[in-house]
């Protein structure tokens, strides 16, 4: 009887041990690193708040079961991402979200063990070596990556439709960003029969010269290959474009809301909501290298008619009817 009693005791112990471990895991406070040059998750404004909402929908309570350690590179200074990434690794966070290609590139050499969820609108994850494949990335990086060739072609096509005289285009490219969108834009321009001139931006001081070059090239429009630097100095870019009477197109909806003529790109709020799904699965035990990389699921065309009026440009009705938002 004593042997039977001991056997039952040990059997119960083995059965209860996983449950106890699960209870301890359930009570864990997850620390999530967040590397960005934009807003931190604890800031109330859209679209970043969609990350917290997405986590809440999956049973996490931000501030209680999940806390963010945000590191932000201010004023578009993406060169600081290396030291900020190293700081998050030193904190031994459970997971890191990297927002932008510069953040993803900085995180890659910083850690091979901490899971990384990327929100990246520029990098080709396979060609850059971040992933073995979209279906099974391997390593510790997964997330949402934009299909640059497809979106770049669509963006140029929309600009050509909005500005029928378009034949010469200048692309403003920040040298600190991944070149994939630039190469895709060059390919798209050739297929559309457009002459494209690339002007490289390395600091805010280059912006005025870039628009002088665009005027000298007799450009009919400007493609903004977005970066943190351009976003931080967007008001200046809008002013320079208006001075030179140059139509502009960018990739995120809020750029058009802030004065760029047009924007076509992914819904940022939904990108953060997609990221919440990755975070939830990884916190529940999924291996990042086995989670397929996803593409953005919704794109928005925004047209700013105030800017069009200032440029004395009439946007064809066929383009306006396809817009998700028209700013008047």
Image: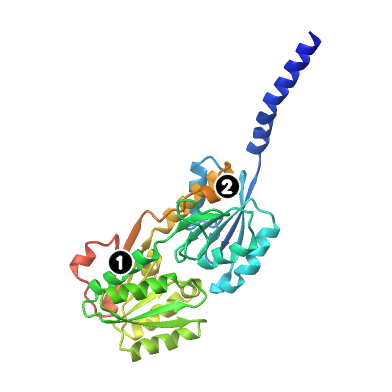
Instruction: Specify whether residue 7 is in view.
Output: yes
Residue receiving disc 2: 62
Q: Residue visible at 59% across and 53% down?
A: 115
Q: Nearer the viewer, residue 52 or 328?
A: 52
Q: Nearer the viewer, residue 24 or 6?
A: 6
Work out which quarter of the rendered image holds the N terminus and state it. Answer: top right
Q: In the visual, does 325 lie left or right of 123?
A: left
Q: Residues within 10 Å of mark 1 (few under 14, many from 20)?
A: some
- The x and y percentages for residue 269 are 43, 55
Residue receiving disc 1: 154
- The x and y percentages for residue 311 are 28, 80
Q: Outermost residue, right direction?
A: 2
Q: Residues within 10 Å of mark 2 (few under 14, many from 20)?
A: some
Q: Residue 263's image quarter? A: bottom left
Q: Is residue 4 above or below residue 12?
A: above
Q: CA distance from mark 2 to mark 1?
A: 37 Å
Q: Secondary structure at mark 1?
A: helix
Q: Secondary structure at mark 2?
A: loop
- The x and y percentages for residue 149 are 36, 66
Q: Nearer the viewer, residue 4 or 114?
A: 4
């Amino acid at each position: 009887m004593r042997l039977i009693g001991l056997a039952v005791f040990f059997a119960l112990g083995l059965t209860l041990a996983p449950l106890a471990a699960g209870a301890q895991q359930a009570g864990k406070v997850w620390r999530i690193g967040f590397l960005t040059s934009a807003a931190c998750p604890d800031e109330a404004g859209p679209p970043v708040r969609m990350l917290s909402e997405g986590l809440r929908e999956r049973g996490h309570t931000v501030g209680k079961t999940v806390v963010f350690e945000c590191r932000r590179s201010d004023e578009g200074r993406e060169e600081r991402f290396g030291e900020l990434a190293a700081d998050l690794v030193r904190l031994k966070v459970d997971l890191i979200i990297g927002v932008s290609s510069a953040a993803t590139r900085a995180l890659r050499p910083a850690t091979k063990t901490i899971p990384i969820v990327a929100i990246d609108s520029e990098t080709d994850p396979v060609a850059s070596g971040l992933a073995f494949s979209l279906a099974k990335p391997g390593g510790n990086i997964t997330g949402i990556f934009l299909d640059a060739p497809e979106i770049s072609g669509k963006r140029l096509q929309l600009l050509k439709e909005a500005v029928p005289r378009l034949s010469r285009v200048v692309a403003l490219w920040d040298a600190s960003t991944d070149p994939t969108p630039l190469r895709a834009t060059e390919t798209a321009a050739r297929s559309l029969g457009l002459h494209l001139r690339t002007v490289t931006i390395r600091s805010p001081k280059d912006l005025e010269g870039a628009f002088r070059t665009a005027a000298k090239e007799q450009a009919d429009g400007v493609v903004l290959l977005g970066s943190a630097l351009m976003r931080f100095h967007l008001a200046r870019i809008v002013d320079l474009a208006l001075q030179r009477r140059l139509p502009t197109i960018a990739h995120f909806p809020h750029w058009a809301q802030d004065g760029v003529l047009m924007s076509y790109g992914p819904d940022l709020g939904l990108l953060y909501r997609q990221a919440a799904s990755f975070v939830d699965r990884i916190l529940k035990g999924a291996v990042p290298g086995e989670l397929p990389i996803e593409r953005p699921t919704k794109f928005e065309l925004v047209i700013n008619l105030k800017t069009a009026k200032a440029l004395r440009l009439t946007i064809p009705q066929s383009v306006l009817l396809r817009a998700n938002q028209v700013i008047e």
